[in-house]
Amino acid sequence: MPSRTKKFRGLRTHGRGKKSGRGAGIIGGHGNAGLGKTKKIQTLKNDRNYFGRQGFKRPQCTIKVNRTINVGELAEKLDYFVSSGSAKKNDDVYEINLADVGIDKLLGTGNINAKVKITTNKASVIASKKIQDAGGFIINTDMTMVEEHTQ
């Protein structure tokens, strides 16, 4: 009896038809092949959110990101601000306008020992308390104090 391979020599498909003789042809492909066609019902049963989009993306022009600085960082960079001309030092009091530097908000992490007169749009309650304890004060141009969540 001849082997199956020998029997079909010279025939294009070896008796399997056009597609089933190819790799993974009769099962519809490997992996996620055909999820939108031959396996669509199975896909919808197993994962009904496979097709389509969820949620939305806000336009970037509507999102405003605040540039912030902590009190500790401000204390480290005071000499740099004076040398670059963004701040002034009168006797032992530093005067700085954070809006000119490009900073929108002052936050309260860290410690400061220098006396500073700060003009800013927004400052947290903890930051203003630390500045006042060091002998300085804050001028808010926005006139809003941001309360931080304390536990």
Image: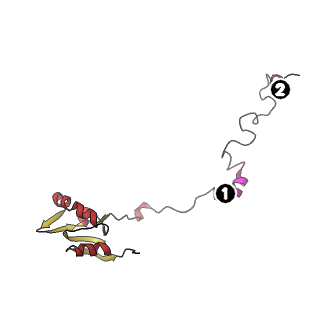
**Relative to 29, does residue 52 appear above or below in the rendering?**
below
Q: Secondary structure at mark 2?
A: helix
| 100 vs 123, nearest the viewer | 123
Quarter of the C terminus within the rendering: bottom left
Main secondary structure type of the part rendered in magenta: loop
Please name the residue that numbered disc 2 is placed on.
4
Mark 2 residue type: Arg
- Which residue in the rendered view is the most extreme toward the left? 91
The image position of residue 74, as x and y in percent, is 25, 64
Judge the density around disc 2: few (<14), some (14-19), many (≥20) Cα neighbours within 10 Å: few
What's the CA distance linking mark 2 and mark 1? 42 Å
Q: Along the polypeptide, which appears first: circle 2 or circle 1?
A: 2
Q: Write down the region rendered in magenta.
A: 20-47
On the question of residue 122 being in view, the answer is yes
22 inside magenta stretch = yes
Tell me the residue at 74%/42% (across/down): 27
Name which quarter of the figure residue 104 lies in. bottom left
On the question of residue 124 being in view, the answer is no
Please name the residue that numbered disc 1 is placed on.
47
Q: Secondary structure at mark 1?
A: loop
**Relative to 15, does residue 136 appear above or below in the rendering?**
below
Q: Is residue 66 left or right of residue 92?
A: right
Quarter of the N terminus within the rendering: top right
The image position of residue 119, as x and y in percent, is 23, 71
The image position of residue 15, as x and y in percent, is 82, 30
